[in-house]
Image (tube, grey):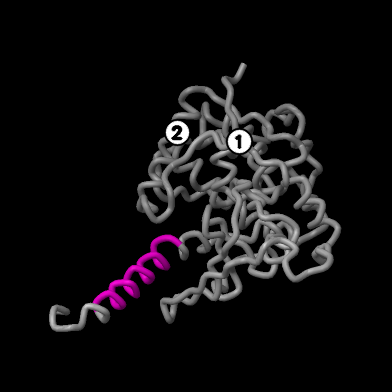
């Protein structure tokens, strides 16, 4: 469209609107899509009820991060200081608003404790100490998502080929979950862990669409239901890993170890997979 005949103010306004749309689609939306709130662990399916921290682009339920911001102005995931949020995010109207937070305590005689459950408060307290970021794969929006995904696949493949293994993150940053009595929690765990399993199998097997993802997750959850000690060694009966060995071969034990570490410090915690990828430490296996 030829905009040369428009007044300069109109052209400037149109350019501004287009830039906002691009920012919404390329930066804000990917920060929310497929994510869960790290505080309450609810899915962030409804963009209109989500908020994205402007500094680090981590997404939360709007109510959760507002309550958190009444206590402190550090991102619960990466500890970045923040004073504003993107909210009222609408993909249909291609619009969003930016909320500038008032100074802590401004207009309030007392900063009240948010009405979180005791379990959520414990999780938030445990995550208050920042974890050191050890790697990055590109900032969402500035690097295409498929490039970031490919970089992560190459990184995961190198972990297996170099014989590395994850070092457990400090206990205060990991939460164990009991799946034996809670069917809803078991399904939530499956939803969180299967994308990780899919990526690992893609890296190991070099198959873009591994068909055994559900088999692996079912095997692992079945083991959890039988009170498998995820903190112990690979003390499993000889034939337990046989279903995995048929297609993972020599990678089976390494994969099973990484899966258990993933459960402890990602699927069983308030971390997102992006944060876990960035902070997990590796060492050479003995």
- Residue drawn at point x = 60 percent, y = 20 percent: 285
| Residue 126 in sight | yes
Where's the N terminus, which quadrant?
bottom left
Q: On the image, numbered disc 1 is attached to which residue? A: 132
Q: In this view, does 119 lie to the left or right of 148?
A: right
The percent position of residue 59, horizontal first and vertical second, equals 57, 60
Q: Among all residues in the image, which is located at the extreme right?
A: 118
Q: On the image, numbered disc 2 is attached to which residue? A: 157
Indicate the secondary structure of the residue bearing disc 2: helix
Q: Among all residues in the image, which is located at the extreme top?
A: 286
Given contact means CB atoms under 8 Å apart, are the residues at marks 1 and 2 in contact?
no
Above or below: residue 22 compared with residue 264: below
Where's the C terminus, which quadrant?
top right
Residue range of the region highlighted in magenta in the rendering: 11-27
The verdict on residue 14 being magenta is: yes
Q: In this view, does 29 lie to the left or right of 132?
A: left
Nearer to the camera, 164 or 31: 31
Count of residue discs: 2
Above or below: residue 168 compared with residue 272: above
Q: In this view, does 264 lie to the left or right of 26?
A: right
- Residue drawn at point x = 65 percent, y = 51 percent: 74
């Amino acid at each position: 469209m030829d905009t040369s005949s428009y007044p300069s103010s109109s052209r400037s306004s149109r350019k501004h609107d287009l830039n906002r749309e691009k920012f919404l689609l390329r930066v804000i939306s990917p920060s929310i899509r497929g994510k869960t709130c790290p505080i309450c662990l609810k899915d962030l399916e409804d963009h209109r009820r989500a908020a994205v921290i402007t500094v680090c682009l981590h997404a939360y339920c709007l109510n959760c991060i507002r309550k958190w911001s009444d206590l402190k102005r550090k991102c619960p995931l990466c500890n970045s200081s923040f004073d504003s949020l993107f909210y009222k995010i609408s993909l249909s109207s291609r619009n969003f608003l930016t909320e500038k937070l008032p100074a802590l305590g401004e207009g309030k005689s007392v900063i009240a404790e948010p009405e979180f459950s005791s379990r959520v408060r414990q999780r938030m307290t445990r995550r208050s100490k920042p974890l050191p970021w050890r790697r990055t794969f590109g900032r969402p929006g500035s690097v295409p998502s498929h490039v970031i995904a490919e970089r992560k696949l190459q990184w995961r493949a190198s972990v297996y080929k170099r014989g590395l293994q994850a070092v457990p993150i400090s206990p205060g940053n990991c939460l164990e979950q009991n799946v034996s009595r809670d069917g809803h929690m078991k399904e939530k765990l499956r939803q969180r862990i299967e994308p990780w399993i899919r990526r690992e199998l893609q890296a190991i097997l070099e198959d873009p669409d591994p068909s055994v993802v559900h088999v692996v997750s079912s095997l692992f959850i079945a083991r959890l239901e039988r009170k498998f000690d995820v903190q112990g060694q690979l003390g499993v009966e000889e034939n337990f890993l046989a279903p995995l060995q048929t297609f993972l071969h020599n990678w089976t034990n390494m994969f099973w170890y990484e899966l258990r570490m993933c459960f402890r410090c990602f699927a069983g915690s308030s971390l997102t997979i992006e944060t876990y990828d960035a902070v997990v430490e590796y060492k050479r296996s003995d």
